[in-house]
Image (tube, rainbow, N blue to C red):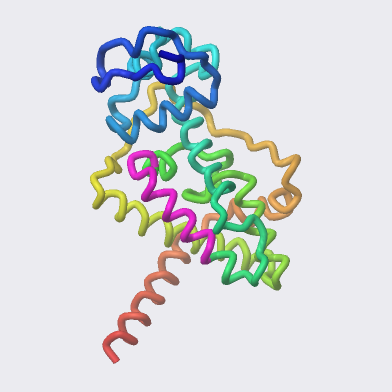
């Protein structure tokens, strides 16, 4: 049996996986972690259990992921990165901003439905900056989003507002959808509380320019505007 063919145990809490030790790297560990979460749930994920699934001792994993929190962050990272390989999602608008947003929204929904147990992690893990909102939560994607809108006529403020509204709509809808699929959407406590992250924006000129706007707390205004829009839509349905 080759290394890649070694089959892991079906018990997340015990057992050894196969008879040969697989060659490890960070990507392989994170992919195995994402698969584990989908199969057994986030609350069962430990370094020991993941090591058992990979056929190695837990200590072997720490060379690539120094803690369980780092493992969870990495799982979120590789799942979000799948958007780049979605042929229906464009990094920049090719047929107008509406087409760009539609493709991005459907791509995120496909991601959530493919990884329903991981998606709540995408919604809850600390982001690269406090103003980055899930589910579109990587600096590269936020830069892409804001550039797509400002390059097609949106002002800086309008682009930031659109990012917030887009994020809120998708997050609420997709969390409800994966919850209906049986996903655990309850909070998962961090075993290692961490200070807020300081994002490195050196490669993101638009985020540097708009950081102050992104950092403003407009939660109350967003709630009122969303509620008014909902009431307008209900009135239209009644008519």
Whether the magenta-drawn stretch holds residue 112 is answered as: yes
| Nearer to me, 84 or 180 | 84
| Nearer to me, 201 or 53 | 53
Residue 108 spot, x, y in % from top left: 47, 54
| Nearer to me, 198 or 120 | 120
Identity of the residue drawn at 44% across and 49% down: 111
Residue 194 spot, x, y in % from top left: 49, 26
- What is the quadrant of the C terminus in the image? bottom left
Residue 184 spot, x, y in % from top left: 27, 40
Whether the magenta-drawn stretch holds residue 2 is answered as: no
Looking at the image, residue 103 sits to the left or right of residue 114; the answer is right
Q: What residue occupies the far front of the structure in this picture?
A: 1
- What is the quadrant of the N terminus in the image? top left
Q: Is residue 12 positioned above or below 141 on the image?
A: above
* Dominant secondary structure, magenta: helix
Residue 118, quarter of the rendered image: top left
Identity of the residue drawn at 46% across and 65% down: 222
| Nearer to me, 90 or 44 | 90
Residue range (magenta) = 102-118
Identity of the residue drawn at 44% across and 59% down: 168
Q: Is residue 193 positioned above or below 174 on the image?
A: above
Residue 200, quarter of the rendered image: top right
Q: Is residue 235 positioned above or below 158 on the image?
A: below
């Amino acid at each position: 049996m080759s290394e890649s063919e070694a089959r892991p145990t079906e018990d997340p809490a015990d057992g050894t996986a196969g008879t040969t030790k697989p060659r490890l790297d960070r990507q392989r560990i994170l992919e195995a972690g994402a698969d584990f979460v989908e199969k057994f749930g986030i609350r069962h994920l430990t370094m020991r259990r993941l090591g058992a699934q990979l056929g190695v001792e837990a200590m072997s994993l720490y060379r690539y992921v120094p803690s369980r929190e780092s493992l969870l962050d990495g799982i979120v990272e590789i799942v979000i990165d799948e958007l780049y390989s979605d042929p229906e999602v464009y990094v920049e608008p090719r047929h107008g901003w509406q087409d760009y947003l539609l493709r991005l929204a459907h791509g995120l929904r496909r991601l959530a439905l493919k990884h329903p147990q991981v998606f709540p992690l995408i919604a809850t893990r600390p982001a690269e900056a406090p103003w980055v909102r899930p589910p579109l939560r990587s600096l590269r994607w936020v830069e892409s989003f804001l550039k797509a809108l400002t390059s097609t006529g949106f002002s800086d403020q309008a682009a930031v507002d659109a990012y917030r509204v887009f994020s809120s709509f998708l997050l609420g809808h997709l969390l409800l959808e994966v919850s209906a699929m049986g996903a655990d959407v309850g909070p998962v406590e961090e075993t290692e509380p961490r200070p807020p992250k300081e994002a490195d924006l050196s490669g993101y000129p638009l985020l540097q320019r708009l950081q102050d706007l992104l950092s403003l707390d407009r939660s109350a205004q967003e709630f009122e505007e969303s509620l008014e829009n909902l009431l307008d839509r209900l009135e239209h349905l009644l008519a």
